[in-house]
Image: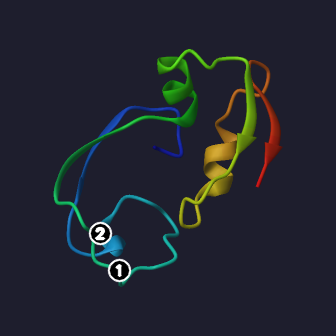
Amino acid sequence: MCPEDKERQWTLSGYAENAPCDGCLYPQVPSIYTGPVECFSLYSLLLAVNQTTVVDYLSLDMEGVELRVLENIPFDKLTIKVST
């Protein structure tokens, strides 16, 4: 999942410091996957599963970019009842 509402093609390799997430908290954790990664925003993923109006519970653990994810949720279209 991407923080922004954009589709991207990223390559993750080496350590998290090479990953395209501004502010990753754990730069010395080696990545498990090397190769292209197609990335979508939370709202795009919800659209894909036809969950476009209400989310009962949302829990985010994005290694320091949770605020960027939340800033890009269209709250005028989506209601999140509980978030942690």
In the displayed structure image, the side of residue 27 where residue 72 appears, left or right: right
Q: Residue at x 28, y 77 (%)?
A: 30
Vertical relation: 50 (above or below) 17: above
Residue at the spot 33% in from the left edge and 38% down from the top edge: 8
Residue 63 x/y as whole percent: 54, 66
Mark 2 lies on residue: 18
Q: Amino acid at mark 2?
A: Asn
Quick one: which residue is furthest to the left in this view? 35
User: Quarter of the image holding residue 80?
Assistant: top right
Counting residues from the N terminus, which is met first, the one under dot 2 or under dot 1? 2
Graded by Cα atoms within 10 Å as few (under 14), some (14 to 19) or many (20 or more), the crowding at tag 2 reads: some
| 73 to 22, vertically: above or below | above
Rendered-image quadrant of the C terminus: bottom right
Q: How is the image coloured?
A: rainbow
Q: Residue at x 35, y 72 (%)?
A: 16
Amino acid found under the numbered disc labelled 1: Val
Q: Is residue 66 left or right of residue 27?
A: right
On the image, numbered disc 1 is attached to which residue?
29
Q: Whole-Å distance between the Cαs marked 2 and 1?
A: 11 Å
Residue 82 x, y percent position in the rendering: 82, 43
Q: Residue furthest bottom?
A: 28
Q: Residue at x 53, y 46 (%)?
A: 3
Dot 1 falls on a residue whose secondary structure is loop
Q: Position of residue 24 (x, y in %)?
A: 48, 70
In which quadrant of the rendered view does residue 72 lie? top right
Question: Residue 61's x, y, as percent?
Answer: 59, 60
**Horizontal placement of 15 versus 77: left or right?**
left
Q: Is residue 58 above or below residue 78?
A: below
